[in-house]
Image (tube, helix red, strand yellow):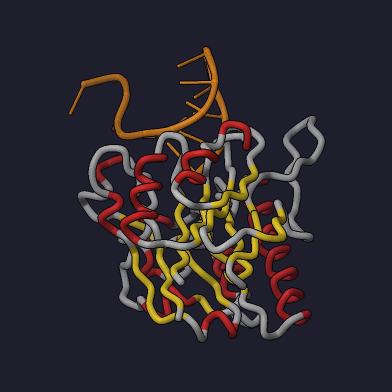
DNA sequence: ATGGTCGCTGGGCGA
């Protein structure tokens, strides 16, 4: 079985590229982030015609996450129990479409779009830390309830865990993604029982999954490693290889992120 | 070169 995660930055604009990726990669389950649409705008039919079922949640033009699978989609959850809400000024707190869980071929797959954080003094930063903490709390509980479960936490984590996960970490001084608190919140999934399997299989420094659209970042290889896959022990044992589909960033009409692909026995 | 890249939307926000 092959499982992948990809922040597509609009599933409607990227539809042809996503379908082409599924076909050429032979991916069975794809966790999608940043669909940037409501569910009634999602191109369900195109995926169904390609042989995939879709579970998607999206409330407006921002965020939006999905799991598309050709090995079944069961027990869909459009949030996790401790997922925080975010309150804009003078508005009621709202849940955002940043997490979707679905069981596909015996694997509990979560497509995750961790809040960006914006700036260290922004309310979105505290929200980001709470979001990661809430997810860790639930992930630990899922594993405690069933230590043999195959669980995959896939997505755009918006954290640069190591200095070698960016072209020049000094360019991020005082910014989000590299703070000690964010890195601790990311690493806390280890003690919770999970292994970050993309690093386990692709340990080379400067293995990037994202390049900004601006300033010719891809041509200059000014990238970030922010897309990851935490696996429970039972799933980790099945992972035989990981690939970053760097070529997907090339050419006109690319997402700023590329797919990360896990091979399972 | 008083912008600079995208996407959604149809002005400005979000990344």
- Quadrant of the image occupied by residue A147: bottom right
Q: Residue at x 39, y 58 (%)?
A: A259
Residue A57: percent from the left, percent from the top?
65, 44
Residue A98: percent from the left, percent from the top?
63, 50
Q: In which quarter of the image is the C terminus of chain A?
A: bottom left
| Furthest residue in direction right, as rendered | A92
Residue A25: percent from the left, percent from the top?
34, 61
Depth order, front residue of A51/A203: A51
From the viewer's perspective, is A124 left or right of A137? left
Q: Residue at x 74, y 45 (%)?
A: A95
- Quadrant of the image occupied by residue A252: top left
Q: Where A22 falls versus A188 (above or below)? A: above
Residue A35: percent from the left, percent from the top?
52, 42
Depth order, front residue of A18/A48: A48
Q: Where A34 falls versus A262 (above or below)? A: above
Residue A115 in sight from this viewpoint = yes
From the viewer's perspective, is A196 left or right of A150? left
Q: How many labels does the image show?
A: 0
Depth order, front residue of A115/A117: A115
Depth order, front residue of A175/A44: A44
């Amino acid at each position: 079985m092959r499982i992948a995660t990809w922040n597509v930055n609009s599933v409607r604009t990227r539809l042809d590229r996503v379908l082409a990726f599924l076909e050429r990669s032979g991916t069975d389950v794809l966790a999608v982030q940043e669909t940037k649409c409501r569910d009634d705008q999602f191109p369900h039919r195109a995926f169904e015609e390609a042989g995939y079922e879709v579970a998607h949640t999206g409330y407006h033009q921002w965020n939006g996450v999905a799991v598309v699978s050709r090995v079944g989609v069961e027990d869909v959850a459009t949030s996790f129990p401790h997922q925080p809400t975010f309150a804009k000024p003078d508005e009621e707190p709202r849940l955002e479409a940043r997490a979707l869980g679905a069981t596909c071929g015996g694997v509990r797959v979560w497509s995750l779009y961790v809040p960006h954080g914006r700036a260290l003094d922004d309310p979105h930063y505290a929200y980001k830390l709470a979001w990661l903490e809430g997810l860790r709390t639930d992930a630990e509980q899922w594993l405690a309830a069933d230590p043999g479960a195959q669980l995959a936490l896939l997505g755009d984590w918006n954290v640069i865990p190591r200095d070698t996960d960016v072209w020049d970490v000094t360019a991020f001084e005082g910014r989000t993604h590299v703070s000690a608190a964010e890195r601790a919140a990311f690493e806390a999934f280890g003690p919770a029982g999970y292994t970050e399997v993309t690093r386990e299989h692709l340990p080379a420094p400067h293995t990037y999954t994202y390049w900004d659209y601006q300033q010719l970042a891809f041509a200059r290889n000014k990238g970030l490693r922010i897309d990851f896959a935490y696996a429970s022990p039972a799933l980790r044992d099945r992972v035989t290889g990981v690939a970053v589909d760097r070529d997907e960033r090339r050419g006109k009409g690319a997402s700023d992120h590329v797919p990360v692909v896990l091979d399972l026995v």
